[in-house]
Amino acid sequence: MNLARVKSPLPGPKGRALLEKWHRYEADVVGYQAPVVWDHAKGCVVTDVDGNTYLDWTCGVLVTNVGHCHPHLVAAAQKATARLLNNYECANVERIAAAERLVKALPPHLDKCFFLSTGSETTEAAHRLMKRRTGKYEILGFHGGFHGRTSAGASMGGMPGPKKGYGPAIPGMIRAPYPNPYRDPAGWCDDGPDFPKYFAFLEEVVMANSTGSLAGCIVEPYEGASGFIFPPRGWLKKLEEWVHARGMLLTVDEVQASYGRTGKMWAIEHENVRADLLTIGKAIGCGVPVSAVAGTSDVFSCLSKGEMSSTLGGNPVASAAVSAVLDIYASEPLVENSAKMGAYMLARLKEMAPKCPYLGEVRGLGLVMGLEFVKDKKSKTPAPELIKPLINDCANHGLLIGSVGMFGNVIRVAPPLVITKDEADESLAIMEGALGRLKL
Ligand SMILES: Cc1ncc(COP(=O)(O)O)c(C=O)c1O
C-alpha cells in the first residue's frame, strides 16, 4: 500500500486558509517550500492539515535523523519538561548526563563540549575560540561555505544570502575556493591525494590576503547550503595537515553532516580528520532545539569562568533530548542504514540522470544527496527555474523535497535515517515521474 496520498491539488482547503493567515501575521521571508501545512509526522511520513500524506526527503532541514517524533525522544522530552524547564548556568541532572554522553560519542581526541541552542551559535563560538586560543584574528573560510546567519557565521561563510545588503563582513576573513568536482575548470580535483594545484593556489590566496595573523580555518566536510558539494576524497585530510602545519586551529562545521548523515557518525571519520573544534546542531536534538561546540580541553582552556554562556544552552529539556537521541543511535542501526540506503538511493538516482536532460549531476554520501539541475549538460548553466515546479510536482504526488545551491538549482535528498527500502522505492518512483514531466 502506498504511504503517500495527496487527495487534491495543493494547497488543500485547510492548508490554503492557514497559509493565508500565516502570511498575514508572520513575515514571509523564508525560502520557497511546497504549499503544505504540516500537522503531524512519524518516521518518514508527514501528514498535513488536510489529511494528505507525504514521504519526506527534507527531515526539516537535515534535523530529524531518528525519524519524525521518535517515541523515545518524545517521551524523554515530555518527562524533562514536566520536571524542570530552565536553569541558567547551573548544573542539572540532564545537562550533566548529556555532556558525558556526547563527549563519549565524539571522536576520542575531542574531550569537551559546550551546549548552545542553534547551529549559528556554535560557529560563532568556534570563531571566538579559534581567535582567543591562538591570540590571532584571521579566519580562513571557503567560497560556498555556510555557517549560519549571525554576523561571524555569515562573514566566515561564502554564500551571498546571509551577507548581501548588510555592509562589510567582519574584518579578518579570508575565503578560498572549495574544490567542486562538477565545476572544476582549474583541475583542482584531479590530482589527489596531495592536490598540489589546489594547495599552491591556497598558498597564493593566503599570501595575497593575510596580514600574517591566521588563527584558524572553518570548513564544512561537504558544502550543504551551496549545493551539496562533496570535495574529492582526501582533500579534507590534506587541508587539516595544511592548517596544522601553520599552527592554525581547524573547525569542522558538522552542524548538518554529523549524526550518521554521511554514513558515519561524524563526517570527519571518513578520512580520520583531527578537527580541533567540531560544531554540532540539527540532529543532536532531532527537532528539540539544541546544539553544541565540541573541542579539545586545550582549546577550551583559553576561556575563564563566565566567558562562554547561554540563556537556554544546556537546559534540561534540550539536554534530555541529547541523551535520548544518543540512546536511539545506540539501539538502532541508523548509521549503517544511512550508508546502505544512501548507496541504494544514489545508484537509483544516478540511473535516472541520463533520462532527464536537465539533471546535470547526482552526488552524495550516505543519506545526503544533491540533484543539480542545469539548462543543458554541456554548458552546465544552472537552471534554478526548474526547482519550484519540481518541488510542487513532487509534493502533489506525495514527496516533500527542498532546494539549496549557490545558484538555487540543487534539490536536497535527505530523508530520515530510518527510511526503509519500500519508502525509498516509493519516493524514488515519485521523483522519477516528476523528472519525466520536467520542462524548461
Ligand atoms: C553547516 C551549517 N552550519 C551552520 C548552520 C546554522 O544552523 P542554524 O540554522 O541552526 O543556526 C547550518 C544550517 O543550515 C549549517 O548547515
Image: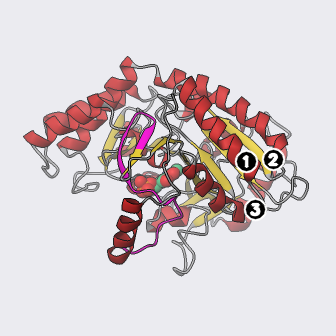
Give the residue type at disc 3: Ala
**Image side of residue 427 versus residue 131, left or right:** right
Q: CA distance from mark 2 to mark 1?
A: 6 Å
**Can residue 427 be spotted in the picture?**
yes
Give the residue type at disc 1: Leu
Q: Nearer the viewer, residue 273 or 64?
A: 64
Mark earlier in primary sequence (2, 1): 2
Q: What residue lies at 25% left-to-right and 35% top-to-bottom? A: 74
Q: CA distance from mark 1 to mark 3?
A: 14 Å
Q: What's drawn in magenta, residue-wise?
A: 26-46
Q: Residue furthest front?
A: 8
| Colouring scheme applied when the structure was drawn | secondary structure
In the picture of the structure, the residue carrying the numbered disc 3 is 383
Q: Nearer the viewer, residue 81 or 35?
A: 35
**Image side of residue 328 versus residue 372, left or right:** left
**Image side of residue 283 versus residue 114, left or right:** right
Mark earlier in primary sequence (2, 3): 2
Location of residue 400 with respect to 211 vertically, above or below:
above
What label sits on residue 435 in the rendered view?
1
Q: Position of residue 326 (x, y in %)?
A: 34, 28
Q: Nearer the viewer, mark 2 or mark 3?
A: 2
